[in-house]
Amino acid sequence: QVQLVESGGGFVQPGGSLRLSCVASGSGNSIDAMGWYRQAPGKQREFVAAISRAGTTNYADSVKGRFTISRNNANNTAYLQMNNLKPEDTAVYYCAAGMLISAPRGWGQGTQVSVSS
């Protein structure tokens, strides 16, 4: 069982920046990938970004060049730096972790990101 606690998020104007954090616990060796999904109102949850324990990253096309994911393996923490935010980035962002990001063993509680002028 993996427990994930995320922080960050909030409200910004278009072009602004936010940083999300996610701390994993209770994982032992069951985590290789950490990352984020997001879900906007009325839409399905979608993949945003992921990073492996070795540092390999993967991004959704919609956020490439604007979002950067990083990770500190020593304290099981992942970070998502979001720059040049757009209104279409508005969603609840969920941290996820597991051996594969496509099959998470745990989810964070979700944090709201709102981008509006």
Image: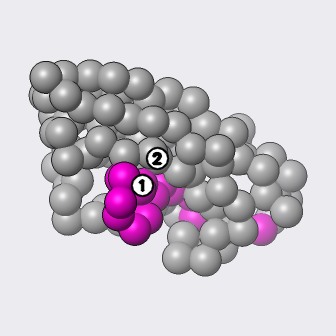
Amino acid type assigned to the residue bearing label 1 in the image:
Arg
Secondary structure of the residue carrying tag 2 is strand
Q: Residue at point 80% right, 65% down?
A: 29
Tell me where residue 69 appears, x and y as whole percent. Answer: 40, 47
Q: Dot 2, crowdedness within 10 Å: few (<14), some or many (≥20)? A: many
Of the image marks 1 and 2, the number of the one nearer the N terminus: 1
Tell me where residue 11 appears, x and y as whole percent. Answer: 33, 23
**Tag shown at residue 93:** 2
Residues tagged 1 and 2 counted as in contact (Cβ below 8 A) = yes
Q: Residue at point 65% right, 44% down?
A: 109
Q: Residue at point 53% right, 51% down?
A: 94
Secondary structure of the residue carrying tag 1 is strand
Can residue 54 be seen from the camera position used here? no
Residue 68 quadrant:
top left
Q: Which residues are magenta?
A: 30-49
Q: Which residue is more in the foreground, 37 or 66? A: 37
Can residue 92 be seen from the camera position used here? yes
Amino acid type assigned to the residue bearing label 2 in the image:
Tyr
Q: Residue at point 14% right, 28% down?
A: 14
Q: CA distance from mark 1 to mark 2?
A: 4 Å
**Tag shown at residue 92:** none
Left or right: 54 in relation to 108: left
Residue 17 quadrant:
top left
Left or right: 62 in relation to 46: left
| Relative height, residue 92 to residue 34 (above, below) | above
Please, which residue is most extreme toward the front here? 42
Q: Which residue is more in the foreground, 81 or 53? A: 81
- What residue is disc 1 on? 38
Q: Please say whether residue 32 is one of the residues in the magenta stretch.
A: yes
**Quadrant in which the C terminus appears:** top left
Q: Which residue is more in the foreground, 20 or 39? A: 39
